[in-house]
């Protein structure tokens, strides 16, 4: 049994920011299932959207976010996050984060933040560190965490489940008391107790066959919160990034939207521009529009991909602005300064999640969720590019202020140790990997960019069968991280399908051929799922 004041699940920007903000007031454990730098944040290329230029305003950023969110954003939440962004950015710079700068024209060498542009933004407002922004944020935050004696980091530790008062059969409002954690090195399951548990576990891209996300993105936070009885909202809104590198050997490599922001143009493989048929903003339209347009062009032409062409820019500019994209594509034999990049849409971001307010509070006392795992109301039906790191920074800071101002009472309930299953049977591990593949493929085929009721129903049936099998393994065998992830992606798949079935309209990222128009009655209406326990 380990006891802390604050448990932080996940080591991306949300988790690290929260930990740094509470460490002066108590002992913090950060629990992460791989190494500390392996988070969704680490792979963010584009950057952080925030109002830092005189040409821009909070009003304009709010308007762009609401427009992208297609009538489903919570305007108060949008306004709070956009307004508080600049102060959080200033703190990040103070901490050592180095954003890219540029020389102010005709200024005798004065420098300013270099602001990028992405789809749906009416102004240049994306702060970035070339095309490796997430890596630079992780570096700066982890360096700060390393100096905090009050923070312990547990790497290669997989959180199995939340421990709640209701699960222990206690009466009264449900309260989170801690977590059960698998130490992957020893195979032992340990109990961690704390009055405050913050989930910063990221999203669920791995529920789809093709994704820009790293392997860790298996929806663990949403799945465990749902199992514990928390409300989960708007899971039908899975954002497909329009441009993931198409190459047989490249796994999940994103081609940042900033490439289009700097002049990259989408074309068919015959070299014909096509976005003017779909939206006046062409290649820089909102992501849902661009991903659907690419999907439709691929279906129309029978091609397996489209092209993204940035060869209209000088080679020196491309190599300096996008060093990571340039060198990675070159590794696969594509010189992006001379030839177009083959790209396809891929699952990228979960806009829904565990329902929270702007302070990260869930409906289970002591349980907070921040970042991609949470649904605050900022993103609505379609996230505006680069708003997610902003949300993570602002809401993690707000959650920290909240728990410091309104502390939770210490855990005073006897928490039983984890019950170990029987020995694992290596033959059965084949079944785990088979079920993994089946879920990811059926989600791609039946619950992708364009949906129908029939395909959703088919997916629902298959997922229910798979879940029965998974439950059997889960209770019969010793838990492994593969089995735990499988259980989580199956639950998340079920939540996405059920939410999509609940929404009888097309809005933002939920496009259903049986209901191709938005329904006014569903504007401002979330789909909310909660497990009866
Ligand atoms: C990108 O660089 O295109 C990703 C930015 C984002 O998803 O916000």
Image (cartoon, rainbow, N blue to C red):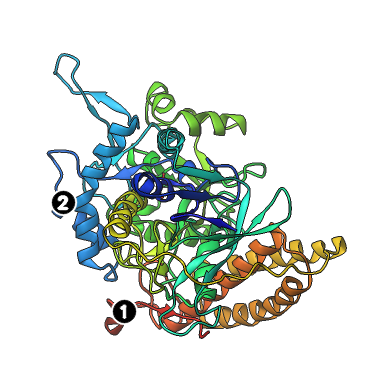
**Number of the label disc, if any, that sits on residue 525:** 1
Q: In which quarter of the image is residue 110?
A: top left
Q: Which residue is drawn at 28% across and 84% down?
A: 521
The residue nearer to you, when weighing 25 against 293, is 25
User: In the rendering, at what x and y percent does residue 65 appear?
Assistant: 26, 58
Vertical arrangement, residue 79 with respect to residue 112, above or below: below
- Residue at mark 2: C-beta within 8 A of ligand 1: no
User: In the rendering, at what x and y percent does residue 164 appear?
Assistant: 51, 73
**Number of the label disc, if any, that sits on residue 58:** 2
Q: Residues within 10 Å of mark 2 (few under 14, many from 20)?
A: many
User: In the rendering, at what x and y percent does residue 381 appear?
Assistant: 35, 67
For marks 2 and 1 on the same chain, the one whose residue lies earlier in the sequence:
2
The residue nearer to you, when weighing 289 against 510, is 510
- Asked whether residue 502 appears in the rendered view, the answer is yes
Q: Quadrant of residue 75?
A: bottom left
The secondary element bearing badge 2 is classed as helix
User: In the rendering, at what x and y percent does residue 368 appear?
Assistant: 40, 63
The CA distance from mark 2 to mark 1 is 25 Å
Vertical arrangement, residue 399 with respect to residue 73, above or below: above
**Number of the label disc, if any, that sits on residue 76:** none
Give the quarter of the figure containing the N terminus.
Answer: bottom right
The secondary element bearing badge 1 is classed as loop
- Asked whether residue 208 appears in the rendered view, the answer is no
Q: Residues within 10 Å of mark 1 (few under 14, many from 20)?
A: some
């Amino acid at each position: 049994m380990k006891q802390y004041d604050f448990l932080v699940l996940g080591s991306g920007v949300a988790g690290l920011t929260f930990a740094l903000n509470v460490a002066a007031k108590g002992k913090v454990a950060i629990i992460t299932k791989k190494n500390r730098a392996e988070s969704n944040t680490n792979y963010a290329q584009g950057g952080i959207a925030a109002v830092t230029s005189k040409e821009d305003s909070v009003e304009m950023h709010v308007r762009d976010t609401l427009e992208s969110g297609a009538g489903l954003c919570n305007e108060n939440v949008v306004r709070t996050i956009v307004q508080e962004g600049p102060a959080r950015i200033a703190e990040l710079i103070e901490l050592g984060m180095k954003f890219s700068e540029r020389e102010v024209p005709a200024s005798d060498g004065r420098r300013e933040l270099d602001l990028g542009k992405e789809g749906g933004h009416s102004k240049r407002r994306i702060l970035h560190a070339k095309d490796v922004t997430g890596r630079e944020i992780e570096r700066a935050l982890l360096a700060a965490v390393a100096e905090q004696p009050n923070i312990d980091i547990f790497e290669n530790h997989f959180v199995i489940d939340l421990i709640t008062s209701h699960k222990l059969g206690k009466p009264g409002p449900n309260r989170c008391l801690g977590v059960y954690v698998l130490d992957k090195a020893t195979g032992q399951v340990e109990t961690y107790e704390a009055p405050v548990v913050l989930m910063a576990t990221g999203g669920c891209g791995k529920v789809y066959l093709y994704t820009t996300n790293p392997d860790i993105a298996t929806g663990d936070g949403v799945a465990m919160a749902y199992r514990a009885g928390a409300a989960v909202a708007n899971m039908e809104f899975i954002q497909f990034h329009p441009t993931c590198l198409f190459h047989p050997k490249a796994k999940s490599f994103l081609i940042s939207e900033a490439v289009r922001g700097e002049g990259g143009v989408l074309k068919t493989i015959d070299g014909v521009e096509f976005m003017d048929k779909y939206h006046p903003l062409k290649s820089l339209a909102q992501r849902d529009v661009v991903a659907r347009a690419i999907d439709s062009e691929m279906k129309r032409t029978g091609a397996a991909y489209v092209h993204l062409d940035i060869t209209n820019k000088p080679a020196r500019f491309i190599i300096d602005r996008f060093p990571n994209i340039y060198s990675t594509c070159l590794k696969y034999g594509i010189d992006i300064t001379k030839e177009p990049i083959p790209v396809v849409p891929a699952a990228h971001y979960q806009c829904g999640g565990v329902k929270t307010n702007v302070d990260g509070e869930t409906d289970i006392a002591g349980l907070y969720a921040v970042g991609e795992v949470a649904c605050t109301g900022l993103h609505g039906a379609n996230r505006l590019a680069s708003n997610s790191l902003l949300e993570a920074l602002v809401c993690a800071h707000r959650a920290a202020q909240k728990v410091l101002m309104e502390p939770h009472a210490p855990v005073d309930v006897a928490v039983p140790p984890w019950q170990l299953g029987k020995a694992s049977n290596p033959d059965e591990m084949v079944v785990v990997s088979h079920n993994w593949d089946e879920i990811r493929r059926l989600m791609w085929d039946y619950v992708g960019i364009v949906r129908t009721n029939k395909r959703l129903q088919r997916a629902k049936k298959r997922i229910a069968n798979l879940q029965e099998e998974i439950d059997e393994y889960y209770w019969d065998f010793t838990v492994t991280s593969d089995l735990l992830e499988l259980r989580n992606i199956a639950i998340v798949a079920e939540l996405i399908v059920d939410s999509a079935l609940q929404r009888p309209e097309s809005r933002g990222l939920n496009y259903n051929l049986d209901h191709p128009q938005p329904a006014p009655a569903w504007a401002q209406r979330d789909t909310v799922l909660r497990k009866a326990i």
